[in-house]
Image (cartoon, rainbow, N blue to C red):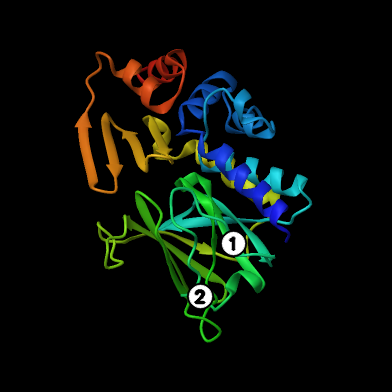
Amino acid sequence: MDASTWQKILDLCTRLSNVTYENLTKIIRLEQTGSATGARNLDDSDQNDVDTWMGGGTCFSMTWHLYQSLRDMGLEPRLVMGHKRKERNIHCALILPNVVLDTPPLSLGNTPPLDTSNLVPRAWSLPTDYLFDPGYLIFDPLPIPAAPPFGTGDAIFPLVPNSVRLVRPVQDRMELWTGGALGDRGLAGAQMKLRFEYPLDGVGVEEFKQHWVESFSREMMTYPVLNRLDRERGIQYYYQKGNLVTRDANGSRMERLDEGGRVEKLSEIFKLSPDLIQKALSILSK
């Protein structure tokens, strides 16, 4: 892959990083249409310009937008589903397979240039699969380590404020771990936790859309979930069930948001319309 194409991919990821992860538009559209299928059919991710979106989106919207955009570039991404303990197909991401770069990868987000020495020497010049996981606020393409015995099956990436670890114990399965920012000794500031497990064979478009429809009936649709990454400053904001968590390289802080002024503060932090936030909260309070 030439440098200009890779740069277009990075630019696409940068544009997507300005989108807020939120389930408010799902809640509103489900109320409007009365069906999960109808709500999914109205999703903004079928439009190429993220600036025209009603708000943001969940992992399905972000991944689907990225999938379509990469296909429009003539590439062949693969959709994959993520499992969390006993919860199956609760998350999604995509993989861009067999990428061979002409030059070493450019800097990732707010991190130093990517060090692939823990994968294979000059790994960027060998066919490599890349993980894209915008729904978990990972807006950098991450090279997936080769499974043993062909590689270490393990790679750590110093993203900020959350470092990322990819573990691939076997050829067809991979685990996503995250923790705090890496310190001087290369250790995460907060203990790494297993987030998702991905079968790497992936799923077809119709199966992906079916899991998307099923997501409208999950428990998380009963309360607001907002997640946003300030990539330049290395700060993550996360809101759920009345609690706002702010995370940076120094750790996490949590505060309880009272109803008075809540809409205005959420609008300011998560770059969403106050009317959209209020409408979703009103639906949830019925």
Q: Residue at x 72, y 61 (%)?
A: 1
The mark nearer the N terminus, 1 or 2, is: 2
SS class of the residue under badge 2?
A: loop
Q: Which mark is residue 196?
A: none
> Picture quarter containing residue 246?
top left
| Residue 55 horizontal side relative to residue 73, left or right | left
Q: Nearer the viewer, residue 157 or 37?
A: 157
Q: Which mark is residue 130?
A: 1
User: Furthest-bottom residue in view?
Assistant: 149
| Residue 142 horizontal side relative to residue 160, left or right | right
| Residue 214 horizontal side relative to residue 228, left or right | right
Tag 1: residue type? Tyr
Q: Nearer the viewer, residue 70 or 256?
A: 70
Q: Can see residue 243?
A: yes
Q: Position of residue 239 (x, y in %)?
A: 33, 33
Q: Is residue 203 above or below residue 118?
A: above
Q: Residue at x 46, y 57 (%)?
A: 83
Q: How many marks?
A: 2
Q: Is residue 63 above or below residue 193?
A: above
Q: Residue at x 39, y 38 (%)?
A: 219
Q: Quadrant of the C terminus?
A: top left
> Picture quarter containing residue 106?
bottom right
Q: Which mark is residue 119?
A: 2
